[in-house]
Amino acid sequence: MTGAPSAGMRWRPNGRAAAFGPDELAACASSVREPVHLVTRPGGSRGLGLGGDTGMGRDGYPLLGTMPPLYPEWLGDREFCRTHGLRFPYVTGEMAGGIASVRLVTAVARAGMLGFFGAAGLAPSDVERAVVRLSADLGRTGGWGVNLIHAPGAEDIVADLLLRHGVPRISASAFLDLTPAVVRCSAAGLTRDPAGRIVRRTHVFAKVSRPEVAAKFMSPAPPAILSALVARGVLTEDEARLAGRIPVAADVTVEADSGGHTDNRPLAVIFPVIQRLRDRICAPYDQAGPVRIGAAGGLGTPAGVAAAFALGAAYVLTGSVNQLAVEAGISDAAKALLADAGVADVAMAPAPDMFEAGIKVQVLRRGTMFAGRAARLHELYRTHESLEEIPARVRTALERDTLGASLDDIWSVTRAFWASRDPAQLERADTDPKHRMALAFRWYLGMSSRWAIEGEPGRVTDYQLWCGPAVGAFNDWAAGTFLADPAERKATQIALNLLEGAAVISRAHQLRSHGVPIPARALSYEPRRLTC
């Protein structure tokens, strides 16, 4: 658009008058799929025109410029959509335990978006069944992928499974450093096209919240890891050589304050830091295209999504709000708790997978006592060296009020679990009473998420629901609209409304920046039923 009237150029209405009043300006701003003309009238006030025609002459309104249509599909990086065969720059994240279910992933993929199956916490056999179904339903080129979470001892098994089945995209999460498993996923199948550019067979998405971790994924894999993988026979020398010339991940998702594992950093703070880091370190490694930076965390409303794109996000990734979707693999009882959450109804609690290190996850506080009970377990772990050291009266209260089971019974179940999953944990527990206590307490933390997924009626106050403030923001936005009805909360409706609203808000901001007196109400969007 130009900032001054074009010499002699005019806009002439054709059935629709120019908009100068607040109501008319808001209506024009929301018509994002039409070109909008910026015009003036005597006195210099600026307004908008839709339709009509433009040309030289004396009649009509002086024309300052024309803004082309704005589609939700165009909000992010077009190369991201081209690379992954998507219509929309929108990703649904890998809510663990199959909450990001096959059904949810399939729905968003068929709508031209990208969905990641939540494999974390599932047995390899369950992951494999999901992969087989997704491959059959969507094919290798469809908009889907599977999570690989950092889990020493288990991640190699899952990585092997994903590569064996040709999973097209792998979202690596909870990694603080590169491991052989994630490097292998990135490097396996690398080739060159006829033009000499490096082509990836498997696209690794890295979910990060710290610059030092982002730097590792935006750089080539360490030679030592590549050499070790070649020595093991799981990479060829050609694959290792090509992997040394490109970043491990071509798509890096910056995760701000979110449900589950989080560093609680605002997106507006951490995103530009990692974006500048990309610009500094990735220039020499462009043989497979530039690293794209996506945004996640706190994206529960159109305004949040619009803000992420305004920061420069190539794509957006939504997480905990998708637990409210019809297709989410979590119980109706858990969805009802989440649907009542406000923006302040969250708390930090000990993480099941990093209990001993004191790492925390963000969970729902309202309607559940999980956060307080989990904190009590960690306090006992921190102040005692073994289960036997806990005073009898404290142990009795713990079993009755928190665990809902005896520690002896819990240890029996825990021993059986680790015997089949990772026997090394039991070997350590046999010689380290404190580790044995940690495993017993982790039973509660692990079961609490399963109870929520399965809807265990007697354990509602123990539900562990990964949840950030975005869920409360979503509930506030959806209140009084069709999305307030749980039956209407399909994953695609949530996505389409977030994207459409982001486009409307983005257009309003653009017009305001050109001096049009856009009213404040134009910077909001109410959910409505949409189709692709």
Image (cartoon, rainbow, N blue to C red):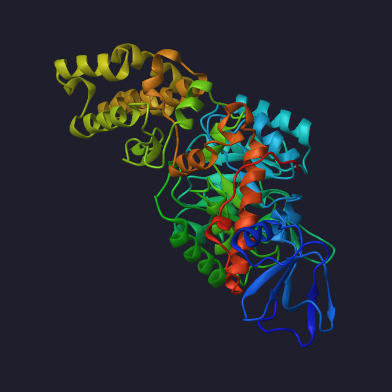
> In screen coordinates, is 420 left or right of 461?
right
On the image, the x and y values in percent for residue 236 come to: 70, 51
Q: Nearer the viewer, residue 442 or 236?
A: 442
On the image, the x and y values in percent for residue 273 come to: 47, 65
Camera sees residue 279 = yes
Is residue 409 shown above or below 431?
A: above
Q: Quadrant of the C terminus?
A: top right
Q: Quadrant of the N terminus?
A: bottom right
For the point 41% across and 38% down, the residue is 342
> In screen coordinates, is 293 left or right of 475?
right
Q: Quadrant of residue 45?
A: bottom right
Camera sees residue 248 = no
On the image, the x and y values in percent for residue 322 come to: 57, 37
Q: Quadrant of residue 480?
A: top right
For the point 15% across and 15% down, the residue is 392
For the point 54% across and 58% down, the residue is 307
